[in-house]
Image (cartoon, rainbow, N blue to C red):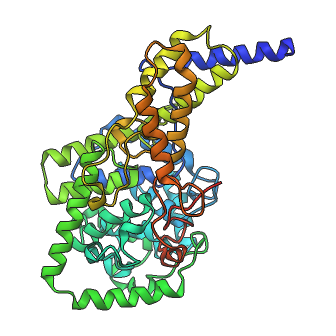
Amino acid sequence: MDVRAKEAIEKGVRKLVGLQQGDGSWRGIYDGPNFLLPMYVVAQRLAGRTVPRKRAEGLLRQIEHWQNPDGSIGLCLQDSGSMFTTALNYVAARMLGAEPERPSLERMRGWIHSNGTPLGAASWGKFFLALCNLYPYDGLTPLMPELWILPYAVPVHPGRLWCHCRQVYLPMAWLYGRRVCMPEDELIRALRRELYGKDYGEVDFFAHRFHTSPCDRRFPPSRLLVAADGILRAAERLSPGRLRERALRRVLDCIDYEDKTTGFIDIGPVNGVLNSIVQHVARPGSDQARRAFDALDEYLYEEDGRIGMNGYNSTALWDTAFSVQAILAAGLGGRYRECLRAAHRYIRENQVLEDPPEHERWFRDPARGGWPFSDRRHGWPISDCTAEGFKASVYLSPYVENPLPEHRLRWAVELILGWQNADGGWATYEKRRGGGWLELLNPSDVFGDIMVDYSYP
């Protein structure tokens, strides 16, 4: 090997080793979507929780950091303006105490008005505006909780959806079924004027339930979705109240299961926010509500005086597995044996050791032997994370005193093989459960290929 290349590799590994955390892991910022932070703010206000001043200032700085020169905010930092994210971030900024005359808000509001107002926001944006009492529920596509008590054999049962998708629409169904929203107050009335530029009572929200601004119209609604909207509205009118209550109880049980099996972290921050709101509304002041909101703070991070929200509770297992492999590939395992031992402890301690209880009843796959993206507490093992955790454990065995036992390695292999789809490939979290035609019922407007967990190369 060239001397300069060898020196560069050794320098890189020294830097990497210096970034190792006290628990033996490596981890980094994993933000991305610019709609997570405003969802967090909405949950805090709906639950009557005060965001501390210093945190509010950091959140505001993050919102302004995302803002494009035209005043908009995209789905991610590199994206052009989205009505979904711009409207939600405007609302969040006002809820954090920013005045409408603030220059960044004036530019944001100008962009909102010149691009059709939140009447054209993507469906998740409209849903969160409904929680804020800034968009009526009859302007949304129905999210009937009754779907969750259909027989699982029905092809459209929500339990057949990709896990991230179903765990978001699960609490949405409960909140929709209860028509949950903030009480109207002076700020809400002001926001209605600021967002729509006209009298709120004059807006025909129902007529705009399938209207999406060009900036948010990435996946237009299919004819099947439009037809389903009419069918679900008719079904909701005819559905007896007792059936709605039964469905809401079932949905709440599923939410409780998700919270319990993940230590209230939940599979991701979107359903974490929504589950927290559900816990507050269903059980105000309860231990469940407190734990749900406490867990949300684990998603926050601070950088350069700004406070953002990660897309996962951490990247620890993923980053640690690759860091270990990098050190060993560099041929420096002997030099950094203590570092590798600490990494091994983290990997060993965060393998999932048992399946979720009664997992089939709660639409979960087996989990024993897997590794999540972050840690064991998260509770949702992923196929590639499990593969990398397994590889790292095998590679580490000559460098540690207590290698991962053979039976735990076997668990990982059995889980991976059990996840293989009929087409020979592997999806992300689970075996594929539904047909690709379910994408025709994708109501998100801005996300593609979210309804089914497909096999990936």
Question: Which quadrant of the structure image shows residue 433?
Answer: bottom left
Tell me where residue 162 appears, x and y as whole percent: 45, 62
Q: Is residue 371 visible?
A: no
- Going 51% across and 40% down the picture, which residue do you hit? 385
Question: Which quadrant of the structure image shows residue 275?
Answer: bottom left
Tell me where residue 370 appears, x and y as whole percent: 43, 41
In this rendering, position of residue 208 left or right of residue 6: left
- Going 13% across and 55% down the picture, which residue do you hit? 283
- Going 47% across and 25% down the picture, which residue do you hit? 25
The foreground one among 83 and 226 is 226
- Going 59% across and 56% down the picture, which residue do you hit? 425
Q: Which image quarter is the C terminus in?
A: bottom right
| Figure check: 240 above or below 391 | below
The foreground one among 185 and 428 is 428
Q: Residue furthest right?
A: 2
Q: Is residue 49 visible?
A: yes
Q: Which image quarter is the N terminus in?
A: top right
The foreground one among 182 and 153 is 153
Tell me where residue 372 appears, x and y as whole percent: 44, 41
Tell me where residue 245 appears, x and y as whole percent: 15, 74
| Figure check: 447 above or below 331 | below
How many numbered tags mark residues here?
Answer: 0
